[in-house]
Image (tube, rainbow, N blue to C red):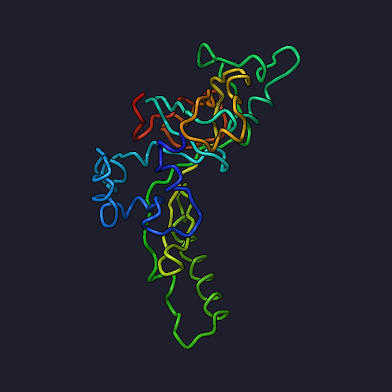
Amino acid sequence: MKRALFAITILLSSIIIKADEGMWIPSLLKELNIDDMKANGLKLSAEDIYSINNSSMKDAIISFGGFCTGEIISNQGLILTNHHCGYGQIQSHSSVENDYLTNGFWAMKKEEELANPGLTATFIRRIDEVTTQVLEGVTSEMTESERKVIVANNIKSIEKEATKDNVFGAKIKSMFYGNKYFMFITETFKDVRMVGAPPSAIGKFGGDTDNWMWPRHTGDFSLFRIYADKDNNPAEYSKDNIPYTPKHHLPV
């Protein structure tokens, strides 16, 4: 799952990125990578993966809880993620009487889906290059310490302005060995409910060792669903919330 959906790690990676190593910034695919990717068999266009004006693959990829990844696979906010990513939630709902870790769990209707306080699903809505703004006031005569102070203050100011009077989050990251800066605009949903999980004998088959092998034979998956308010906006848990209608979902 992780390897097939390379965009997950592209969008949410916080490491320094080198353009020819297989982890790329989606907003720069058309400029830097798409020809090589197509030469290697890719059938998608750069716009299919990342589009500013239209729905695209980026709108189906999430950060699951801030510690894992997932993808939206239905027009009703259904999330597919790894079993080990949902393990904490499966465990929290388990008891001696209802041992979901051992036996698995399946909600047969939406009313049976289980709430998970504190669990979030975060989308990246767009990626903006902000190098000029971040480096404003920086000169070649400055010491590295002086430069760091100005850059840090600029970043704080840019992020604050980007999130003023709206529901979005913003995080600026350094890329290309500190030569460029990109701001990731995010939207976080806080009502994420557990829908299904296989027994651990299937979900954890192969353990952490097999998690990094390919090809991989396992059932390492679990299902959750995003809920939103009546206007399809992020909201705290409420019985009145409805399944989220995504901008894009991956057909399965």
Residue ID at (45%, 50%): 166
Q: Is residue 190 above or below residue 182?
A: above
Q: Is residue 226 visible in the rendered structure shown here?
A: no
Quadrant position of the C terminus in the picture: top left
Residue occupying the far bottom of the picture: 141
Horizontal and vertical percent for residue 154? 48, 70
Q: Viewer-proximal residue, 227 or 184?
A: 184
Residue 152 appearing in the image: yes
- Compare residues 23 and 71 and report the one nearer the observer: 23
Count of marks overlaid on the render = 0
- Figure quadrant of residue 200: top right
Question: In the drawing, does residue 53 fall left or right of residue 249?
Answer: left
Occupied quadrant, residue 233: top left
| Residue drawn at point x = 64 percent, y = 14 percent | 103
Residue 167 image point, x, y percent: 47, 47
In-image side of 126 versus 98 (left or right): left
Image-based side of 39 in relation to 248, left or right: left
Q: Position of residue 19 (x, y in %)?
A: 37, 58
Residue 146 is situated, as x and y percent measured from the top left of the image, at 55, 81
Q: Quadrant of the N terminus?
A: top left
Q: Is residue 128 above or below residue 109?
A: below
Residue placed furthest toward the right = 96
Q: Is residue 67 above or below residue 192?
A: below
* Depth order, front residue of 242/147: 147
